[in-house]
Amino acid sequence: MSDAPTADLRVITTEDAPAAIGPYSQAIRANNLVFTAGQIPLDPATKHVVPGDVSAQTERVMANLGAVLAAAGSGFDRVLKTTCFLANLDDFPAFNVVYGRFFGDAPPARSTVQVAKLPLGVLVEVEAVAVAER
């Protein structure tokens, strides 16, 4: 038997972000690390995709991501890494302007990729790994 410590795993849920629509969690907290599911621009109140361009959709994605992080005891200032998915990499400059407002002077590491298709035909999805309060 190993003497290695076991992870304290906790499912994170909040009504301030869209509920999971499949067999996944909004986030998992493992000890003081938070792993979020990808957030898309669904309004949690209406459960509809917000209308508009990539800037409008990114605003909603980041609001959803912030709500999940807060529910896990974290925030944008504690994000270590994001993975960003764009339906069209030509939207990167507009996406980047909105995204950048949420991270200040010490932005996390990031990967951004263009994908063939995103759920519900949205333009953007973002997931994060963050540190939570102890």
Image (spheres, grey):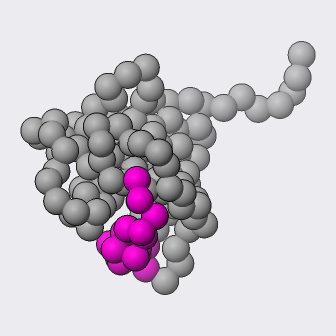
**Residue 18: x, y in percent?**
26, 38
Q: Position of residue 23 (x, y in %)?
A: 43, 20
Q: Main SS type for the magenta part?
A: helix
> Image quadrant of residue 3?
top right
51 left or right, relative to 69: left
The residue drawn where x is 49% and y is 83% is 105
In this picture, residue 65 sits left or right of residue 128: left
Quarter occupied by the N terminus: top right
Residue 2 in view, yes or no: yes
Q: Is residue 111 above or below residue 15?
A: below
Across and down, in percent, residue 60 comes to 24, 56
Is 44 within the magenta? no
Q: Position of residue 70 (x, y in %)?
A: 35, 51
Position above or below: 54 against 46: below
- Residue found at x 16% / y 36%: 47
Q: Which residues are magenta?
A: 87-104
